[in-house]
Image (spheres, rainbow, N blue to C red):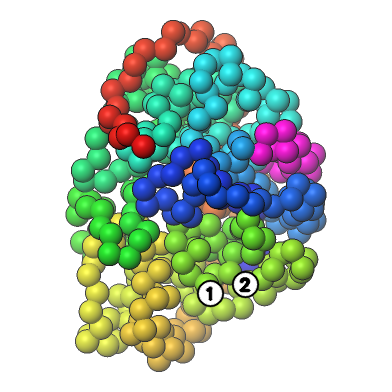
Amino acid sequence: MLPKTLTLLATYQCTAACDQCCFGCHPRKHGRIPQERILSYIDQAAALGSVINVVFSGGECFLLGRDLVEAVGRAHGHGLLTRCVTNGFWATSERAARRRLEPLREAGLTELNLSTGDAHLQYVPAERVRTAALVAYELGFGLAIMVETSEERAFTKEHLLGDPLFAALHRRDPEGLIIQENVWIPMEQGRTIEHDPVHYRCADNPHLMKGCHNVLRNMVITPDEDYVVCCGLTMDQIPELHIGDAGSEPLAGIAARADRDLLRRWIRVDGPERIIQYLQDRDPTIPYAWNRVHPCEACRDLHHRPDLRDAVRRYAGEVAGDVLLRFNLAEAAEEVLTGVGVNEDDVGMADGLTLARVRRPRSEPAPAQKPLVPLPMATPQAR
């Protein structure tokens, strides 16, 4: 199974230092993938023939400046879709937002993802997210806003929709202005973030327990130029997902061996929660608190906990044939869908990072930008 998405985490430097950031990004983090290597990774990904999408994230990818524009243009030149994930710090005004987004549109950028919520609002006001989103919509980008969610959050999706222009656009074109809430999870040992049990990935919510569509379909290059087989929130805490040095070995060679690990295939078809459930069925003495709200938490447990690791070694052989059969059938089904012309932007991106669709040309112009009005938001803490 070859990857469909190349994710470039060119830097872990960010204008924000969000509490429990998945990659520990911070303004004082330095270092990045050199530009010539970024362009090389895009060329190598395109040469694989399976990659359809290049994601620029981090860290804050807009800190790359003109290098980001060049990289987007390189990917677009290969016929690849492109996505930038950003906190929108640069949208200090409509003019500033246009100055950053228009060169990216000319380079061929397909989608813009904006991140906000209580943690982000300590550093980036909601008005900037609003400005970035409205300008991006007018320029025709695929657009998604991801809002952090937890039980004690102050800022919600409804705060964004409380703005009349946002609400009108969302009603008229919900796939053109996607606003989605994503659970915020603890990254530090001993930290907890409370969530409503409706989010628990357990037997009471079986619809949440499903295969991971990120692993193996996403190849991630970190600032240190590690090749990682997924872009999960806990990937940097799971050494087994880092399978090669992209700086010294061609991507094609690393990608070719990525799916040889049985556990990765098992995670792909069943997801970490169902694997843990199976292990508990085989050994009822294994304890597990079924209060995880994100598959990456369960994946971290599966790789970190000695009892779960030992259980995988003991029982994986029992399901190996079934896992391999379903894995190969799923891969074949994807090829069939592609062969009959079902596009990834119609069924959702393979990496599972966003539901944003590629925007089709509109028959009517976007509404004129209105003067900014304050949005209700969490009160930023002093830093």
User: Which image quarter holds the C terminus?
Assistant: top left
In depth, the one of 110 and 204 nearer the eye is 110
Residue 45 visible in the picture: yes
Magenta-colored segment: predominant secondary structure: helix
Percent x, y of residue 114: 48, 35
In depth, the one of 343 and 208 nearer the eye is 208
Q: Which residues are magenta?
A: 64-81
Percent x, y of residue 374: 34, 16
Q: Which residue sits at x=36%, y=72%?
A: 301
The residue that mark 2 highlights is: 243
> Label 2 is placed on what type of residue?
Ile
Query: Does dot 2 land on a helix, a strand or a loop?
Result: strand
Residue 58 included in the magenta stretch of the image: no
Q: Which residue sits at x=39%, y=88%?
A: 310
The residue that mark 1 highlights is: 240
Percent x, y of residue 278: 33, 79
Q: Which residue sits at x=37%, y=33%?
A: 121
In depth, the one of 302 and 371 nearer the eye is 371
Query: Does dot 1 land on a helix, a strand or a loop?
Result: helix
User: Toward which corner of the image does residue 343 lie, by quadrant?
Assistant: top right
Q: Is residue 118 above or below residue 43?
A: above
Could you give the CA–CA distance between mark 2 and mark 1, rounded to whole angstroms? 7 Å
> Label 1 is placed on what type of residue?
Glu
Residue 53 visible in the picture: no
> Cβ–Cβ below 8 Å for labels 2 and 1?
yes
Q: Residues within 10 Å of mark 2 (few under 14, many from 20)?
A: some
Residue 70 included in the magenta stretch of the image: yes
